[in-house]
Image (cartoon, rainbow, N blue to C red):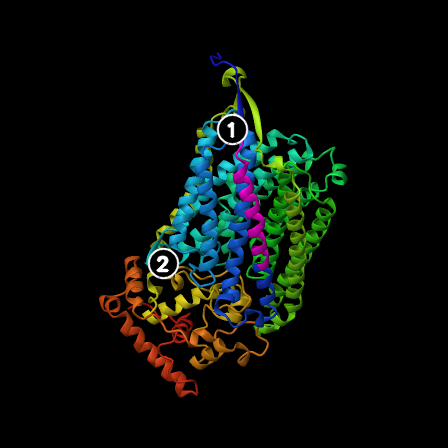
Amino acid sequence: MNTSSNVVEKIIYDDDVVKKFAIATMAWAVAAFLFGLIAAIQIPWWPANLNMEWLTFGRMRPLHTNAAIFAFGGNAIFAGIYHSSQRLLKTRMYSDTLSRIHFWGWQLIIVAAAITLPLGYSQAKEYAELEWPIDIAIAAVWVVFAVNYFMTIHRRREKHLYVALWFYIATIITVAVLHIVNSIEIPVAFMKSYPVYAGIQDAMVQWWYGHNAVAFFLTTPFLGLMYYYIPKAANRPVYSYRLSIIHFWSLVFIYIWAGPHHLLYTSLPEWAQTLGMIFSVMLLAPSWGGMINGLLTLKGSWHLLRTQPLLKFFVAALTFYGMATFEGPLLSIKSVSALGHYTDWIVGHVHGGTLGWNGFLTFGMLYYMIPKLWKTKLYSNKLLENHFWLGLAGVIVYYVSMVVAGITQGSMWRAVTKEGTLVYPDFMETVVRIVPLYWARALGGTLFLIGFLLMCYNIYMTIKLAPKQSKEPDAVEVTRTGYDEVPTTGHRKLEGMGFVFSVLAFLAIAVGSFIEIYPTLSLHRYINPTQVTDPYTPLELAGRGVYVREGCYVCHSQQIRPIVSEVLRYGPASTIEESMWDRPFQWGSKRTGPDLARVGKKYPNLWHFSHMIDPRAITPNSIMPNYPWLADKDTNFIRLRKEVSVMRLLGVPYDDNTAANADGIAQKQAKEIAADIEANGGPRGMEKKEIIALIAYLQSLGQKGKAQ
């Protein structure tokens, strides 16, 4: 029985924080797209690296991905969530103070990333490169966001939780779990740490995180935005409420299992690979369910594409979402992965999703949202149209060029003659063949950026010409009545139980996470005791730090798959034992250059020295940048004691002498390598330089003997 009286309340929404996030989205988008374009040019034209250590592709690529995902994508998510949630819940955000702490805290995190990544402070874990102080800041700001959001749900005026809110809830919970679990690390110095996971453990945890960062940062929140902004822009209800229920729960439950498909044919246990492949293929059904639900929401309203051109962005976004979520399961099939993995096909797949799905949906959301926030009309529909077609052309050129490049790479790498020899034994043959396609990618990125700059001008003029009264916040009058007036059952009842709904969402992602990760934490189950390898020497450990800092993992893998062509090209397939001490693991996900898992002792020390200073002195057509600063910068020998001690704490079998005298042991090995380089015609006095440590590391790959 309803015991509450009807009370009319005036709710004033906090649109100031929405405006802040919207403007930040556009500002950081310029940076993200520009960094991406620079990186795209650096691949076919190595001089674009400018011989400057903080602008090399190895540092620019993680800067681009972090800016695109967390700066552009993150601010877009927050703008949409704060804007739509207040209206769906019919209440102001719980705390203005928490909202602003969230905004400014997130911007400071982005600035910290923009400073530290070019300086080489990186954990070398894709989409999780930021070092431990920033990881802590991310967790703290995310908690502020979560508290503010769930308290807003708690004091809502609308009992029913609309479908968009389901996806927001799943995002907030899952991203917190992913970030915390993947970021457990032991600090060595202020901006240096080692993860607690090693080898296959780190690989499993990283791609559980990496895949689901895409799932729960670039998919579920954007699906929530789709469920709100497409119906609002088209002025039509969601096509199917029942389909949205199936879409949400099946997507959230299945997505979390699919991470291992990034590690097919690697040293990861076969059961984990098969599990990831099966769930990845299953993922097609809920993903297309969401796409169909979005597109059919426009049923009977397609004529609006002529009068409301911003709907074109939403239609294109859903189309790219459908393409990406078909291609993802396809690439997860082992036979297809054997061709596509490590190639530019994966790059095309990722950017088809991020530019086409996330980019276009964000643009449509901003074109809809900003005129309403400033209580005006969009400055120019013509500029919007031009933006759409330029952006669409850019995505298509980018995607097609990379898919063609990837299939070319995979086909050439795998080509074997009837006699059992490689058709293209020289890796550079493949590189030279696809350089024109890299230029096509840069063209696609340029078109996309130009289109976005048109949007920036359009939005700037829209805000500039807005009437003065536009600064007045939106308000709504709400008649608050008892929740028990309308009986509900089934899922509708669950939607009125915010806490229970959130717990069930957590359980949906926790089950798969636990079953995937827990078995690999018992590493001894998978290790052959007769094949246990020695840990890195202190100098090799220092060299590995240089390898990580320079981002070598973004172009080179260290994982030979048990595929005939790879064994012929690189040597025996990689084993679990060979990476059992690796923190972080360096299996890689892209081969712009050849695999390095067994490069040790393949070339003399002077070859490596010359190759790092000027790659074209060794390989004339190389597209690798120069690294002259490695011959100028000194190795931090003193810190090696701390690094070895931390590794020892994590279970690496260093003895007391190595831990206590790591610097002296490293210096002795460095002198031996430097003397060999000098004896063969190289420069003198290199024993203290970082390039010697890097050479020591490279020469150790694939050469570790069995522990005594």
Residue 193 badge: 2
- Pick whichever, 482 or 691, lies toward us: 482
Q: Is residue 354 visible?
A: yes
* Residue denoted by label 1: 91
Question: Looking at numbered disc 2 in the image, what kind of residue is underneath it?
Answer: Ser
Question: Looking at numbered disc 1 in the image, what kind of residue is underneath it?
Answer: Thr
Compared to 350, does 361 lie above or below? above
Q: Where is residue 480 drawn, in percent x and y?
A: 52, 19
Q: Where is residue 652 drawn, in percent x and y?
A: 31, 61
Compared to 121, does 156 lie above or below? above
Task: Classify mark 2: residues with Cα within 10 Å, few (<14), some (14-19) or many (20+).
Answer: many
Element type where label 1 sits in the image = loop
Element type where label 2 sits in the image = strand
Which residue is found at the position 28% from the left and 66% from the top? 641
- Pick whichever, 486 or 511, lies toward us: 486
Q: Where is residue 588 drawn, in percent x and y?
A: 49, 61
Q: Is residue 220 visible?
A: no
Q: Quadrant of residue 162?
A: top right
First in residue order: circle 2 vs circle 1: 1
Q: Main secondary structure of the magenta part?
A: helix
Which range is magenta? 13-34
From the image, which quarter does the C terminus lie in?
A: bottom left
